[in-house]
Image (cartoon, rainbow, N blue to C red):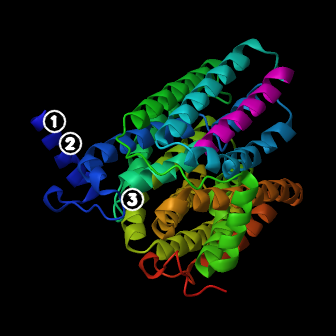
């Protein structure tokens, strides 16, 4: 048992950069300090499984191609990303009270992961048993259920991470989840790239869905095994009270208000990849070699950039947010420039903007999560997370509809709009204070 614990400590020290003899336990309960290495590794395993599952059956690449292959209407395919973003973000405010009422919040993520696994199994069943005119709507509905479960898990994840992972190690954890998940995605992309042909067989989509379902189940088990210190259950509020409290935060804290504005703009980096893929498909084709190149590019982006984003986010979340937003702007501009010379360029060259877009997306995700957890007081962390995610979900839904309309005038119009949003988010992020300078209980910059 001692040997196992020692090995766990050594692995944790390598992955987190934390000397086990002088372990940092900043901003977590004192009795949780001894479980930090185990919780870190379990959370890392949870992230590796879930990150790979997201790429194997996600609405950015795989699900759109799958729906198109069975003849689903175009409007259903266009709804995938808005449903994913809005479904996972908007309901979070409604569940914050329920999560607060339980002393252990890890079971919410465990339940959510189990529901996500079941949804993918049912998608696979619809794919092989339902006629195309029914399979498409059924898969989109299951994606909505999947996304709502993801939203519940997101609120629980932020709270559990805040109680089990010390401040200063959270960015490294998030980056490690993304980096190792990227390695696994790269391996999967290389395997998929061996499948040649103008169309992808149904059997391959079936394998992707069931494989992702198994990974979500494994992620749920890993999260359930974490040692979580019971939290306070008092102070739970209704959805209306949460909304009022969230609006009060926006009114009273200029830091939180600026964070929300920055996140709204930086959301462009998180929804841009499907637009990039469509633009590239129009310019370079949509064969399996192009799709494989894009999947591999995203995987490489996570592998290369996530450790850097994690370390930078632990040092300065606001700087990491600003830099990732600026990179998203540069990516959009580069892609539009390449599109002007599409006839003279090889298809593999389009992997470069997709690589940069993946790096920007990884940076936004790691930095915004780290910054929010660092500035939010422990007692109100679910409220901070739920309100910001709910607001972002509404914006994502609106941007999805705007993207559909902009695409009617040309995909380049949608990309130009995303460039503008990302630039605004990066500029606002620069105005944020460092997390150590912000006092959530008494914001000196309150309006």
Residue 387 among those drawn in magenta: no
Q: Nearer the viewer, residue 161 or 243?
A: 243
**How far apart are the two marked residues, 3 and 1, measured between alpha carbons?**
23 Å
Q: Residue at x 63, y 77 (%)?
A: 258
- 309 above or below 128? below
Question: What residue is pinned by disc 2?
Answer: 8
Question: What residue is pinned by disc 1?
Answer: 4
Q: Is mark 1 on a helix, strand or loop?
A: helix
Q: Which residue is drawn at 21% across and 46% down?
A: 11
x and y, in percent, of residue 244 in the image: 74, 64
Question: What residue is pinned by disc 3?
Answer: 170
Instruction: List the single residue furthest toward the front.
Output: 234
x and y, in percent, of residue 297 in the image: 51, 50
x and y, in percent, of residue 352 in the image: 54, 59
Identify the image quadrant of residue 149. Answer: top right
Q: What element carries label 2?
A: helix
- 436 above or below 15? below
Characterize the local packing of mark 1: few (<14), some (14-19) or many (20 or more) Cα atoms within 10 angstroms.
Answer: few
x and y, in percent, of residue 117 in the image: 57, 27
Q: Are marks 1 and 2 in contact (CB under 8 Å)?
A: yes
Count of labels in the image: 3
From which residue to which does the magenta span run? Answer: 133-152
Q: Do the residues labelled 2 and 3 touch (CB within 8 Å)?
A: no
Q: Which residue is drawn at 21% across and 60% down?
A: 23
């Amino acid at each position: 048992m001692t040997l196992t614990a020692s090995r766990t400590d050594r692995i944790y020290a390598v992955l987190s950069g934390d000397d086990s003899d002088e372990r940092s336990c900043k901003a977590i309960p004192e009795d949780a300090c001894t479980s930090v290495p185990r919780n870190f590794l379990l959370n890392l395993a949870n992230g590796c499984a879930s990150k790979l599952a997201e790429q194997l059956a996600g609405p950015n690449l795989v699900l759109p191609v799958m729906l198109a292959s069975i003849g689903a209407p175009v409007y259903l395919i266009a709804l995938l990303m808005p449903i994913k973003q809005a479904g996972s973000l908007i309901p979070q405010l409604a569940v914050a009270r329920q999560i607060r009422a339980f002393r252990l919040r890890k079971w919410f993520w465990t339940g959510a992961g189990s529901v996500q696994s079941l949804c993918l199994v049912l998608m696979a069943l619809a794919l092989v048993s339902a006629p195309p005119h029914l399979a498409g709507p059924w898969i989109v509905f299951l994606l909505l259920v999947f996304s709502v479960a993801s939203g519940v898990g997101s609120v629980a994840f932020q709270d559990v991470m805040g109680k089990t992972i010390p401040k200063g190690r959270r960015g490294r954890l998030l980056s490690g989840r993304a980096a190792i998940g990227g390695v696994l995605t790269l391996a999967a992309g290389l395997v998929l790239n061996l499948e040649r042909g103008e169309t992808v067989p149904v059997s391959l989509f079936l394998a992707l869905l069931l494989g992702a379902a198994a990974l979500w189940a494994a992620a749920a088990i890993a999260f359930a095994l974490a040692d979580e210190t019971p939290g306070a259950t008092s102070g739970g509020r209704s959805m209306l009270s949460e909304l009022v409290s969230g609006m009060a935060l926006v009114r009273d804290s200029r830091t939180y208000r600026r964070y929300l504005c920055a996140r709204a703009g930086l959301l462009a980096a998180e929804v841009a990849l499907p637009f990039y893929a469509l633009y590239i498909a129009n310019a370079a084709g949509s064969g399996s070699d192009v799709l494989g190149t894009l999947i591999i590019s995203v995987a490489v982006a996570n592998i290369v950039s996530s450790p850097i984003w994690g370390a930078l986010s632990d040092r300065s979340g606001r700087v990491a947010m600003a830099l990732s937003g600026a990179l998203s702007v540069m990516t959009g501009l580069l892609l539009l420039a390449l599109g002007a010379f599409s006839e003279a360029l090889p298809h593999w060259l389009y992997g470069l903007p997709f690589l940069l877009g993946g790096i920007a997306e990884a940076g936004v995700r790691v930095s915004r999560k780290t910054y929010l957890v660092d500035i939010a007081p422990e007692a109100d962390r679910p409220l901070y997370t739920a309100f910001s995610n709910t607001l972002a979900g509404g914006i994502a839904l609106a941007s999805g509809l705007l993207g559909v309309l902009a695409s009617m005038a040309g995909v380049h119009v949608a990309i130009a709009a995303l460039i503008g949003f990302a630039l605004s988010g990066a500029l606002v992020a620069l105005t944020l204070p460092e997390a150590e300078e912000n006092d959530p209980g008494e914001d000196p910059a309150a309006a």
